Image (cartoon, rainbow, N blue to C red):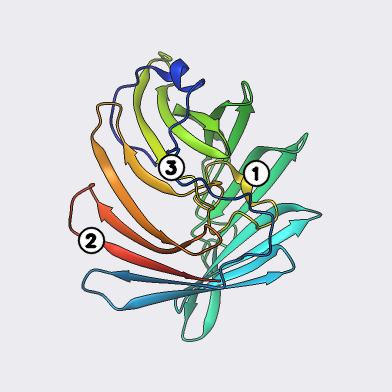
């Protein structure tokens, strides 16, 4: 989620929205959940993701080569476990565990590159989330050395501006100088995210599935567009088709169909 651009006007965004005001969607208080997602990349065959649920809790997301399992404690997502599928066998590669305080995400811990040689993961770390206010969140990254088990804070941290259930700006800050290094601005539609009704998904903040609405553009504050999406919607205000343009150009990079 990180692109190079100087930060300007961060505080102003605390009081204004990046979302489009046209064609507002109805409140998502229903049982709409995507059961499969079909993504087709330019020049490649389609890739289908199958999603399973138990009531409003997501259980798994699976393609031919990868699978993610979701685990809950009460109404909160406690962990995600990632697997690679090789010759029909699922091999665990990554585990992310989430911790909450006062109904908000406080931190997440991960281990990755799990293998026979590294059963506890080759890499490990955690993210810590501090709610400066209801709309401003500090995200710090800590990495753990595999051999010494010593934890070290990253040289940078992120400041997330959060509004209406969406991260609308992500600024990377130099941890030593506290100077802004670069930032991204996110513009959304006013329709429902396909994942909006999944229990607890909205609390995961920077997770790509956690937003309330759908990303239209990712850009710099100099109006340089990195990525652009257009959508077609069903009658309930959920996307049925997303078309992605890498770099904000006119050439289609991929299309994604959502089946509910």
Q: Earlier in the sequence, mark 1 or mark 3?
A: 3
Which residue is found at the position 51% from the left and 86% from the top? 88
Percent position (x, y) of residue 52?
63, 73
Label 1 vs label 3: CA separation? 26 Å
Percent position (x, y) of residue 144?
54, 40
Which residue is found at the position 30% from the left and 78% from the top? 45
- Image disc number at residue 21: none
Q: Nearer the viewer, residue 247 or 196?
A: 196
Q: Earlier in the sequence, mark 3 or mark 2?
A: 3
Q: Which part of the image, by quadrant, shows the N terminus? A: top left
Circle 1 sits on which residue? 203
For label 1, the SS is: helix
For label 2, the SS is: loop
Q: Residues within 10 Å of mark 1 (few under 14, many from 20)?
A: some
Can residue 225 be seen by looking at this rendering?
A: yes
Circle 3 sits on which residue? 22
Label 2 vs label 1: CA separation? 32 Å
**Mark 3 or mark 2: which is in front?**
3
Which residue is found at the position 61% from the left and 21% from the top? 132
Dots 2, 1 in contact, CB < 8 A: no
**Mark 2 or mark 1: which is in front?**
2
Label 3 vs label 2: CA separation? 24 Å
Q: Nearer the viewer, residue 255 or 126?
A: 255
Q: Residues within 10 Å of mark 2 (few under 14, many from 20)?
A: some
**Mark 1 or mark 3: which is in front?**
3
- Is 129 left, or right, of 158 in this rendering? right
- Is 216 left, or right, of 160 in this rendering? left
Q: Residues within 10 Å of mark 3 (few under 14, many from 20)?
A: few
Circle 2 sits on which residue? 252
């Amino acid at each position: 989620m990180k692109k190079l651009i100087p930060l300007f006007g961060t505080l102003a965004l605390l009081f204004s929205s990046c979302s489009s005001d046209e064609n507002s969607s109805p409140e998502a208080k229903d049982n709409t959940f995507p059961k499969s997602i079909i993504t087709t990349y330019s020049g490649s065959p389609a890739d289908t993701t199958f999603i399973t649920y138990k009531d409003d809790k997501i259980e798994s997301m699976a393609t031919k080569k990868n699978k993610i399992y979701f685990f809950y404690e009460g109404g909160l997502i406690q962990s995600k476990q990632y697997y690679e599928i090789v010759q029909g066998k699922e091999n665990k590669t990554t585990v992310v565990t989430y911790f909450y305080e006062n109904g908000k995400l406080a931190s997440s811990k991960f281990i990755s590159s799990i293998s026979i040689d590294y059963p506890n993961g080759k890499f490990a770390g955690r993210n810590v989330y501090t709610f400066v206010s209801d709309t401003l969140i500090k995200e710090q990254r800590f990495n753990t050395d595999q051999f010494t088990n010593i934890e070290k804070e990253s040289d940078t941290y992120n400041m997330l501006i959060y509004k209406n259930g969406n991260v609308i700006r992500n600024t990377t800050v130099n941890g030593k100088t506290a100077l802004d290094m670069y930032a991204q601005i996110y513009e959304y539609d006013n329709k429902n995210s396909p994942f909006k009704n999944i229990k607890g998904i909205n609390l995961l903040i920077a997770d790509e599935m956690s937003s309330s609405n759908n990303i239209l553009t990712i850009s710099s504050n100099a109006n340089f567009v990195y990525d652009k999406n257009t959508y077609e919607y069903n009658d309930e205000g959920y996307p049925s088709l997303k078309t992605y343009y890498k770099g904000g150009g006119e050439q289609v990079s991929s299309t994604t169909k959502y089946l509910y």
